[in-house]
Structure formats: C-alpha cells, structure tokens
Image (cartoon, rainbow, N blue to C red):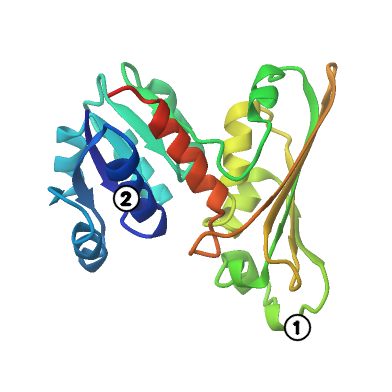
Amino acid sequence: MKVGIIGCGNIGTELALFIQKETNLNLMYLCDVDDDNARKLKERLRDVKITSIGDLITNSDLIIEAASKDTVKDILNTLDLFEKEILIMSTIGIIENMGTFNKIKGCRIHIPSGAIAGLDAITAVSGKITSLTLTTTKPIQGLRDCPHIIKNNIDLKEIKTKRTIFEGNLKEAIEGFPKNINVAATLFLKSKFKKMKIRIIADPETKTNNHEIICKGSFGTITSKTENLPSKNPKTSYLAILSAMQILKDIKN
C-alpha cells in the first residue's frame, strides 16, 4: 500500500517515522506548504518523494492528512477517491464540509479517537443522547493566538488561576479555536448530537490537555476523562498521535 502524508509538522513527522519503523506500509510521498518542513522530514526517511498535493492524492493508496482543515477540504473535493483510504487528523475540516463528506463513495475514511476516550460507547448511543457536554482544560501556551483570545482581548498572562474563557456550541468553538477543538469535531462525528455544549478552561498551572465528556440519555450516563501530555506542539495531545498510530497498525498492507 503506497502512503502519502500531507503535512510535515509535528504530527506528520511522528507518523512518518512510525510508518517506516513499525509497519509494513510503503511511505512514498510527502507534501507540505512549507518546503523546508518537507525537506527536513525527507532527510530523516528513506526513499520518499516530495510532491504536490494533487499528485500525492492521485498516486497514494492511503492518504494521511496532518496539515489543516483547508487540506481536508482539498482532499474531499478531489474527484476520484475510489478505493482509497484516508486518515484525517483535522476533523474540523469534515465538519465544515459535511455536504461534500456525505457524498463521498467508494473510499474508506479513518477518524482517530484523538485525545479522548470512550468514543465506541458514544457511537453506540448515537440517536439516544439528550445532553452532551465537553469540558476542555488547556495550559496557557496551548491557547495563544486563537481567534477567540484575540477577538475578546483576553490577556493570557493575567490568568493566574483556572478560568473559563469560552462556553458555546460547536460552530462557535470552531470559529474561536480552529486549531484546538478537533476533539469536539470528532465527538460530534461520533455522536451526531447537534446540541453539544463546549466549555474551554485556561489553567496556568496544568501541564496536560484535559478533556471531560458527560453524555446523558435513555441509556444512562457516560463519563469520560483524559489528562493528556502535549506533544512537541503544545496545541496537540500526544494521545492524538498515538490513536492515529493504532489505526495505521490496523490497516492491512
């Protein structure tokens, strides 16, 4: 199986090294909007080619998106995805392009569980949920430069104790934290619950990305809590990378 990775930053690099060391998959193509990122990663690998996103999608059997929600849009709008497998990390990109996503036929799309646990149970009770709340607590450094922070003139340096900096729905969360809220997007894709409530807390004392899910319905209550160490990128939990690695292990070459 020929593999191509779009996005050669923290996640793409970790997955590329994992593929060559731990799987029988054939990593052949890299693509990144930053040519330096792609070249630096290529130097750490063997027998890979830097190419355009179009050529990568055309020539790969398994396409790994580790770039951005805009890249997801480009992939989903590709005319021929028949019999391809796609691993999507930026699940916000699916939410913003649901019309296109729902029309895709003949390919298999993998959505990692990311930084949260219990998604199998959430998927099982989809359609029976009456309330769903996600509370995310993050270190200060993982919230810098978010549109919500800038728009509301929130001075993160002035936050000395836990503070709720956002409460709202999925659309509002995506607009305010486009690089921080893939957890919420993944939770929606599994639950199909449109009235999910999202709370984001800034905590200057924590070193982990924490996610607590409370899901209620005719089945009872499901509670899930994870405390994730950040990866090299403070906006990304290491668990998100590990969940993608597990999918790669399960894909048969």
- Counting residues from the start of the chain, the first of labels 2 and 1 encountered is 2
At x 42% / y 38%, what residue is drawn? 88
Image-based side of 65 in relation to 130, left or right: left
Q: Is residue 124 left or right of residue 249?
A: right
Can you identify the residue that label 1 sits on? Answer: 158
Residue found at x 38% / y 52%: 14
Name the secondary structure under disc 2.
helix
- Tell me where residue 237 sits by quadrant: bottom right
Residue 238 in the image, given as x and y percentages of width and height? 54, 53
| The residue positioned farthest toward the bottom in the image shown | 158
Residue 168, percent from left and from top: 73, 50
Residue at (34% x, 39% y) in the render = 22
Callout 1: few (<14), some (14-19), or many (20+) C-alpha neighbours within 10 Å? Answer: few
| Residue 97 visible within the image | no
Which residue is tagged 2? 17
The residue most toward the front is: 21
Look at label 1 and name its amino acid.
Answer: Glu
Mark 2 residue crowding within 10 angstroms, few (<14) / some (14–19) / many (20+) = some
Quadrant the C terminus occupies: top left
* Residue 197: x %, y % from top left: 76, 43
Question: Up-down: is 28 above or below 82?
Answer: below
Q: How many marks?
A: 2
Q: Quadrant of the N terminus?
A: top left
- The percent coordinates of residue 233 (x first, y second) are 49, 64
Tag 1, which secondary structure? Answer: helix
- 116 displayed left or right of 108: right
Depth check: give the residue in front, 85 or 45.
Answer: 45
The answer, for residue 205, to whether it is visible in the render is: yes
